[in-house]
Amino acid sequence: MDLTTLERLPLWIGGKAVAANTTRYGDVTNPATGEVIRHVPFASAADVDRAVQAAREALPAWRSAPSLRRARVLMRFRELLDAHRKDLSRLITQEHGKTLVDAEGEVTRGMEVVEFAMGIPHLQKGEHSENVGTGVDAYSIRQPVGVCVGITPFNFPAMVPMWMFPVALACGNTFVLKPSERDPTTALRLAELLQEAGLPDGVFNVVHGDREAVDALLVHPDVKAISFVGSTPIARHVYETGTQHGKRVQALGGAKNHAIVMPDADLPFAVEAIVGAGYGSAGERCMAIATVVAVGEVGDRLVAALAERARRVSTGNGTTDVEMGPVITRAARERIVGLIDRGCEEGARIVVDGRRIRVAGHENGFFVGPTLFDRVEPGHTIYREEIFGPVLGVVRVDSLEEAIALVNRNPYANGVALFTRSGHAARRFQEEIEVGMVGINVPIPVPMAFYSFGGWRSSLFGDLHVHGMDGVRFYTRGKAVTARWPDDGSAAPGFHMPLMG
């Protein structure tokens, strides 16, 4: 199936592409040109039920398959991802707008989770204790939860789904993916590659849609676990609705990530790192740096260096040799520009203004240039709200203590970074900061696949983070077994509390 030539995208249910039972469709645009390139169906509740039932029917055989057999499907899937890495990257760039280099990096980070999940025969091992009582053994096992759902955002159409479904599938679950309707085609391509890798029909399904599809998944009686990544208001809705209907839910919300720069920091290194973390992927990353906290006398030098580097960021069509592409939609561009306007109105000093950028030959594209504010205050809208665009704001404080307090007061707590040469400052920082993912001279501290990704406070609803061992725990249920094999004639337990020993 040539997905790039389809006018209307299909759903993927039961191992094949099927038409949606709907009259509602949305536009999928190329952000660099502004043109509509295909249409995405908004699945109905009936479509959602078809996908869930396909997953439910496929569950018994898949969960009973040996874990090594499931792992081998993922091994073949990983090889196919590698072989099609550049094709996937081009598809991501076409619908999202990020540069090809960035898109290829996204695919690579998703593959790392597949590689982690390939070790499921080891990761699902339980514990065993012999002779906890006379002739009694105890052991634990972890079993799949059932039909699982992933609801994923536009900013990583390959990586974030692969944070979820490889671990879920490896653990013996079946899966329904609801990708973002803004860049949905990558999810269908992943479904094709899974089928080519030997995944049985119905084990992995894709439904497109808006809130109607999401809400149908949240309340469906056959769905057992839901993983979500997106904005905080929707994350809260997903968590509350899902848990009220008896689901296991992990819902990752928004972010307002800080980078603290100490006076002793390697300034050229810190500036290059912060500019890449703030403006890379046009700032459309949940781990993007949005706020730079300048400590003490470094403020003026830092702002001047950031401004000089921001003005040199090359912006254009992500398929060309540029550092930054467009934002995802016209509405996103208008929102970002409106927030920049608001920052100026509220008294922050705009140092680099990206509102009027024009890219030759792409006048209808959704471009916002690198933007830098200085003298941002915690009460300013551009500090409080997640902008999700290429906008950096500098807040000035007098000490590391004040910087830590500033970060800890923020309602979001996804990621944070410290730039310093001081081991003492770094150790104090990692000890006192109340944020889920911490970087020391690392601007985007996204954990490797064998650790888990997730924030604190309003950046996470639920107890478990995604991928890593938290992912294995989320997609399995623990069971403790106590077993005795008595000889004939041995005494059975009486009416008293059973005791071991």
Image (cartoon, rainbow, N blue to C red):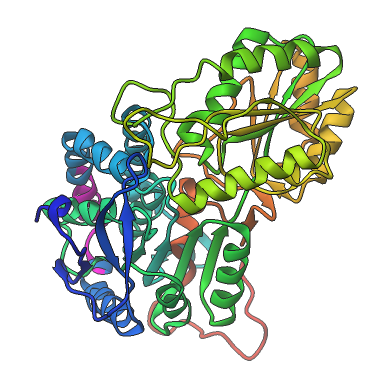
Q: Quadrant of the N terminus?
A: bottom left
Kindly identify the residue that appears in the image at 78 percent across and 16 percent down: 262
Q: Position of residue 229 (x, y in %)?
A: 50, 56
**Could you say which quadrant of the image residue 188 lies in?**
bottom left
Q: Nearer the viewer, residue 58 or 91?
A: 91
Q: Where does residue 269 sit, x and y in percent of width and height?
A: 60, 11
Q: Residue at the location (36% across, 83% down)?
A: 45
Residue 17 x/y as whole percent: 15, 67
Q: Residue furthest left?
A: 1
| In the image: residue 221, left or right of residue 25 | right
Q: Residue furthest bottom?
A: 495
Work out which quarter of the rendered image holds the C terminus and state it.
bottom right
Q: Main secondary structure of the magenta part?
A: helix
Residue 331: tell me if it is visible. yes
Q: Does residue 373 sit above or below 469 in this rendering? A: above
Q: 27 and 493: which one is in front?
A: 27
Q: Is residue 486 visible?
A: no
Q: Which residues are magenta?
A: 64-75
Q: Position of residue 278 (x, y in %)?
A: 58, 30
Q: Is residue 68 rendered magenta in the image?
A: yes
Up/down of 389 relative to 195, above or below: above
